[in-house]
Amino acid sequence: MLSFQQIQYILTLSEELQFQRASDRCFVTQPTLSMQIKKAEESLGSLIFDRSRQPLALTQFGKKILPYLRDTLFEYQRINEFVSRSKGVFKEEVRLAIIPTVAGYMLPDMYQIWKDKLDNVQLVIEEMKTEDLLVAMDERKVDVGILSGPILETNLRTIPLYQEEIKAYFPSEQKSIIDTEELQEAHPWLLNHGNCLRTQMMDFCGLNDNGMKADWDYEGGNIKLLEKMVESYGGYTLVPNFHIQNNKSEDYKTIESRDGEIPAREVIALVSRRKEKWEVIEQIVRTVQLKYNTIQTNSKFKLLNWQ
């Protein structure tokens, strides 16, 4: 049998793949961490880590046992929750991850609402890019993720939240509707790699990395900063509709393809298929739907795939 501490050490080292960083995270010395993991491997009768490689790598046995260790750690945590509940001092922790292009408007909108409705919950909120969020969900570091769909993950439950038009911030353009061919002639200020909105719009607008480089090119991760670059140097950037809110609407243009399609994305929640923490997660989901799912879906919307 492995101890709770050994399981924590193994999972931490599987993330860091470097003994010093893992020991720092676990607040123990490197020899202590190494010794405990070696004892765990002896108990199991197989190596979890291949120490001949730099950085460390999981063995095939290690890869297979890792999900069981995560489940075991989760059950340990449930025991601690039960004890806290029995003492009347329990405050449920729910970990929420949101992609940057949603977090920019959702957190200011929803923070007070969540604080009022979830007064007996410790809500831990983190901003993550889509790929990092999916890994965190798989490793059970996140209870609910809010991101742009679709996501084809059989072990996760998908809950639609709302649909959102994608517009072009293009102040120098006088027309209110821009077609995708016109966008190909102007300089795009795009979010950097790893943001799903970048991939969605490059596909829809027919853009490609090789044709966009210029000596004054810049790729950022902050929509407001990209808008300032547009104001200073021309071109355009792409903006989710709910990001606009009280800004001057005439500077944000509707985008249409030759077929009359308007780009949009579906924002979804990802949750585990397990029932733990569902009451709190459901409240988060319902409050978001109530806040944003008020605009009638446009029949011209072309829902974009981020992958």
Image: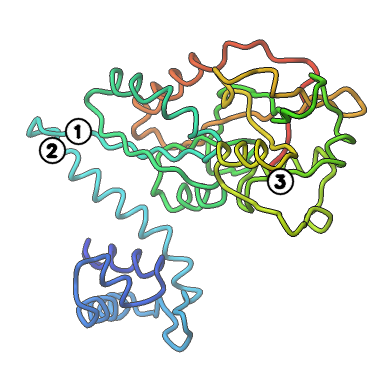
Q: Would you say the residues marked 2 and 3 are in contact, meaning their CB atoms lie under 8 Å apart?
A: no
Q: In this view, does 2 lie to the left or right of 266?
A: left
Identify which residue, 250 or 77, lies in the foreground.
Answer: 250
Report the Cα–Cα distance between label 1 and label 3. 39 Å
- Density class for disc 3 (Cα within 10 Å; few <14, some 14-19, many ≥20) is many
> Percent position (x, y) of residue 183?
83, 37
N-terminal of the two: label 2 or label 3?
A: 2
N-terminal of the two: label 1 or label 3?
A: 1
Q: Which amino acid does label 1 sit on?
A: Lys
N-terminal of the two: label 1 or label 2?
A: 2
Farthest-out residue, right: 258
Q: Would you say the residues marked 1 and 3 are in contact, meaning their CB atoms lie under 8 Å apart?
A: no
Query: For mark 3, what is the residue?
Result: 199
Residue ID at (59%, 49%): 220
Res 151 quadrant in image: top right
> Percent position (x, y) of residue 108?
41, 26
Residue ID at (13%, 40%): 83
Q: Would you say the residues marked 1 and 2 are in contact, meaning their CB atoms lie under 8 Å apart?
A: yes
Camera-side mark, 1 or 3 = 3
Above or below for 34 versus 78: below
> Percent position (x, y) of residue 249?
65, 18
- Number of marks in the image? 3
Quarter of the image that includes the N terminus: bottom left
Marking on residue 160: none
Report the Cα–Cα distance between label 1 and label 2. 8 Å
